Image (spheres, helix red, strand yellow):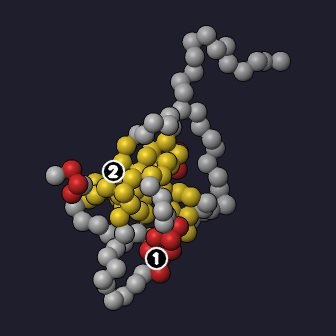
Amino acid sequence: MASNHIFKILFVNQGKVYEVYARKVSHGALFGFVEIEELVFGERSSVVLDPGEERLKSEFAGVKRSYLPLQSVIRIDEVRKQGVSKIVALEGANVAQFPISLLPPSATDPGPKKS
């Protein structure tokens, strides 16, 4: 039954939004990263090939597992059917997200020094 699960993952990479499908998603062994495994792409038996999906196939060819930084993940959905993987340009790509810390502030840390 677990092999029937398909997850749609949306994440940002180099100013573009990637939409990929995978069979396994977890928090992974690396802190602050989402681990995706067993990427799923469309069947090769179809007559019409999607160039966007073919580009993703070649980009992830030979990849066993990917680690996505938590900040880059937009959304993860468990879906009933696989859709088409694609890359879409991010609107407002000239704006970068300010880096955030995933660690809570320490009780012994006095914070920034004031001059």
Question: Which residue is tagged 1?
Answer: 54
Q: State yes or no: discs 2 and 1 in contact (Cβ < 8 Å).
A: no
Taking 44 as reference, is 101 left or right? right
Q: Quadrant of residue 90?
A: bottom right
Identify the residue at horizontal 53%, vertical 45% (top origin): 69
Which mark is first along the chain, 1 or 2?
2
Does 23 sit above or below residue 27? below
Q: Does residue 75 appear in the picture of this structure?
A: no
The spot of residue 39 in percent (x, y) is: 38, 60
Q: Is residue 103 left or right of residue 45?
A: right
Q: CA distance from mark 2 to mark 1?
A: 21 Å
Residue topped by disc 2: 24
Q: Residue furthest right?
A: 115
Residue at x 72% of width, y 21% of height: 112
Kind of element beneath mark 2:
strand
Give the farthest residue toward the front. 62
In the displayed structure, does residue 83 sit left or right of residue 30?
left
